Image (cartoon, grey):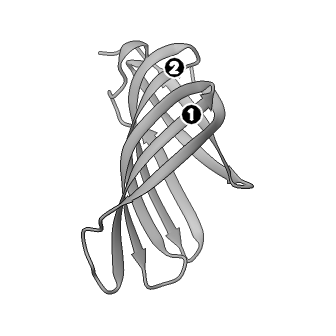
C-alpha cells in the first residue's frame, strides 16, 4: 500500500570547484546539506553535478543524497537520486529512492519525492511503499 509523507526542508548548497571551463556548457559541482521536518524528520548529505548552457533558462542536474532519520516514526537511512532539467524555463524533475538503499526500519523502501518551492520556502511530497527487504 502506498503511503504519503509531506513537510518542509531547509537546504544549503555549497559550490565546489568546477571540473570544466567549456565555452558553451558550464559544468559545476555542489554539496547538499538538508534538514527535513514533518512526516520525514531527517538530515541528508549529498553531491550535485550541474550543467548550464548558453541558452537562457536551460540547464540540467543530477544528484545523490543520503538521508538519515525517521519516516512516520520508522528509523533508518536511504538514498535519493535526482534527475532534473530546465528547458528554456520549463522545469522537469524526478526524485526516486535508489532501489535497496533503505536500512534499519526503512529497509525495503521505494518511492518518489516531489519538491515544491513557494515564496522562497521548500517543501516535499513523498509517496512511498515499505516492502520486506530481501
Q: Is residue 73 above or below residue 55?
A: above
Characterize the local packing of mark 2: few (<14), some (14-19) or many (20 or more) Cα atoms within 10 angstroms.
Answer: many
Relative vertical location of residue 8 with respect to residue 87 in this rendering, above or below: above
Residue 43: give x, y in percent of width and height.
48, 32
Q: Is residue 77 above or below residue 97?
A: above
Q: Which mark is residue 60?
A: none
Horizontal placement of 26 versus 113: left or right? Answer: left
- What residue is drawn where x is 49% and y is 75%? 58
Q: Is residue 74 left or right of residue 90?
A: left
Q: Which mark is residue 36?
A: 1
Residue 53, by quadrant, is bottom left
Q: Earlier in the sequence, mark 2 or mark 1?
A: 1
- Label 2 close to label 1 by CB (< 8 Å): no
Q: Position of residue 111 (x, y in %)?
A: 49, 33
Q: Position of residue 118 (x, y in %)?
A: 72, 53
Among all residues in the image, which is located at the extreme left?
Answer: 19
Q: Which residue is mark 2?
A: 70
Q: Quadrant of the C terminus?
A: top left
Residue at left offset 54%, top offset 21%:
71
Using a 10 Å C-alpha cutoff, classify the residue at mark 1 as few (fewer than 14 neighbours), some (14 to 19) or many (20 or more): many
- Comparing 128 with 48, the one in front is 48
Residue at 56%, 20% in the rendered image: 1
Amino acid at each position: 500500500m502506498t503511503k504519503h509523507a509531506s513537510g518542509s526542508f531547509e537546504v544549503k548548497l555549497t559550490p565546489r570547484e568546477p571540473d570544466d571551463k567549456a565555452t558553451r556548457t558550464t559544468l559545476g559541482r555542489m554539496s547538499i546539506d538538508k534538514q527535513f521536518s514533518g512526516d520525514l524528520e531527517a538530515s541528508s548529505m549529498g553531491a550535485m553535478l550541474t550543467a548550464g548552457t548558453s541558452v537562457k533558462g536551460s540547464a540540467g542536474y543530477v544528484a545523490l543524497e543520503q538521508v538519515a532519520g525517521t519516516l512516520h516514526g520508522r528509523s533508518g537511512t536511504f538514498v535519493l537520486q535526482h534527475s532534473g532539467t530546465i528547458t528554456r524555463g520549463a522545469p522537469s524533475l524526478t526524485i526516486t529512492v535508489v532501489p535497496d538503499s533503505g536500512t534499519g526500519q526503512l529497509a525495503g523502501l521505494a518511492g518518489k519525492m516531489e519538491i515544491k518551492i513557494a515564496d522562497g520556502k521548500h517543501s516535499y511530497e513523498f509517496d512511498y511503499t515499505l516492502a520486506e527487504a530481501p
